[in-house]
Image (tube, coloured by chain):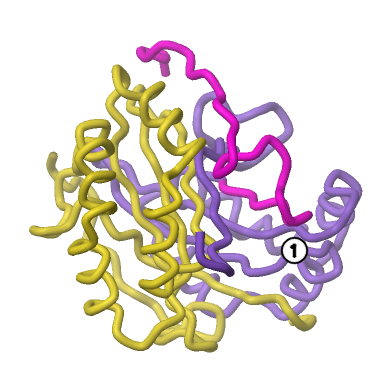
Chain colours: A purple, B yellow
Amino acid sequence: MERTNPAPRAIHGPTNPELPHDGVQRVGAAIILRPEMEDRYRELHAATWPAVLAQLHRSIVRNYSIYTAQLAGVTYLFSYFEYVGSDFAADMAAMAADPATREWWELTDPCQERIPGTPEGQQWLPLESVFHAPLDTPG
Amino acid sequence: MERTNPAPRAIHGPTNPELPHDGVQRVGAAIILRPEMEDRYRELHAATWPAVLAQLHRSIVRNYSIYTAQLAGVTYLFSYFEYVGSDFAADMAAMAADPATREWWELTDPCQERIPGTPEGQQWLPLESVFHAPLDTPG
């Protein structure tokens, strides 16, 4: 799929810092949901296996949501989670090595289609942050 | 834009509850970012006005992120925030009535293009939740 728009320029500032303010890495990502697998995907995610959730917890992932929407006739999934550890690569590798997670991905990967431009070796396309405000205290 | 896929069926369960587990309403939404306005939008959101952040806080919005990605040649924005109040409609109406927020939206609305299917009177297309796990304790 061609990129028709000019390449964007990252702009960092108080509400789009280059590094997290608070040690929390907020990860947004997207992938295509195959229409014929949508019901299956929804069923799986309404009752995610406890062993998969336990591995996410061991990999120091918190507050994990997945949303869906149809855009221009294509159904997408959008995920958001917070990583609160200190070695993201190692914690993601631990997830990828976990037998229950691997078995889970054998069911969920066929529901998904990787988006063109997704980095090699990754399943989901990373989204770029353009704004974040914790809003815990008045701005 | 036509919907080519069958209408989806909401499926609720332990990790996609019909109502929030914890009193937190997690709002995901999407909108198109006009390519010619992308730099302007990024500049604005790297230094969001303190008065706009203050109104978000008064409207009991927390942990607000906006991401961007290009999908099939179109640039989208995806937002995620947590509403922790008890009257979402009233708190959103207070935001829409705030003079600083209205002035801000006069700058940001022209950067955006509403997605076909977005409900009347709304700027952003609401995303449907298919999964949420707080993961505060092992699953």
| Residues in magenta, as a range | A1-28
Residue A136 figure quarter: bottom right
* Closer-to-camera residue (A52/B115): B115
- Compared with residue B108, is residue A2 higher up or lower down, i.e. above or below? above
Q: Position of residue B21 (x, y in %)?
A: 52, 88
In the displayed structure image, the side of residue A48 where residue A33 appears, left or right: left
Q: Which chain contains the residue that carries disc 1?
A: A
Reply yes or no: does residue A23 show up in magenta. Answer: yes
Q: Nearer the viewer, residue B130 or B36?
A: B36
Residue sticking out furthest to the left: B120
Q: How many marks?
A: 1
Residue A89: horizontal and vertical position, in percent?
A: 86, 44
From the top left corner, tell me how far across and down residue B100 is, in percent. 28, 52
On whether residue A44 falls in the magenta region, the answer is: no
Q: Where A118 sits versus A88, above or below?
A: above
* Pointer 1 residue: A61
Instruction: Tell whether B139 sits left or right of B76.
Output: right
What residue do we see at 23% from left, 77% from top? B89
Residue sitting at 69 percent across and 37 percent down? A122
User: Please, what is the dominant secondary structure of the magenta stretch?
Assistant: loop
Three-letter amino acid code at disc 1? Val
| Res. A137 image quadrant | bottom right
Examine the image and state in which quarter residue B125 appears. bottom left
Q: Is residue A93 left or right of residue A29?
A: right
